[in-house]
Image: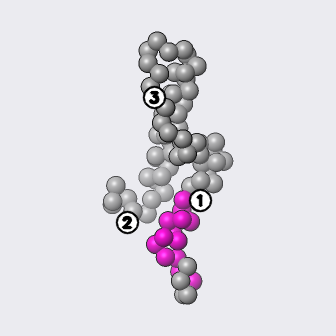
Amino acid sequence: MIGSGSFTDQGVREFLVLQLRIVLKQEMKVYVIEQPVPNDPGANAPRADKDKFKKHMDDMLDVGCLVLATMTPKASEAT
């Protein structure tokens, strides 16, 4: 923060990332930004592996939409 009480660009980013992490933790989807994307288990994999992979991909989509929906117009221009 700078003397006038306004956020610096870095401060705003850190604040928004913190808010995103809070929401994702409550939605039990914070793992999407903390863990690597799993490899596609393939057609012959056990059902549990396929279900886990599908859940991760579905949660990634939810998180991506949340991030895009909450972006400021200025930030979304860069995507």
Location of residue 35 (image quadrant): top right
Between the C-alphas of marks 1 and 3, the distance is 29 Å
**Residue 58 can be seen, yes or no:** no
Q: Position of residue 62 (x, y in %)?
A: 50, 42
Between the C-alphas of marks 2 and 1, the distance is 18 Å
For the residues carrying marks 1 and 3, which lies nearer the camera in this image?
3
Q: Which residue is mark 2?
A: 74
Q: Is residue 10 above or below residue 22?
A: below
What's the magenta bit mostly, secondary-structure-wise? helix
Q: Position of residue 19 (x, y in %)?
A: 59, 59
Q: Which residue is mark 3?
A: 39
Mark 1 vs 3, N-terminal side? 1
Q: Which mark is residue 9?
A: none
Q: Amino acid at mark 3?
A: Asn
Q: Which mark is residue 19?
A: 1
Q: Which region is colored magenta?
A: 5-17
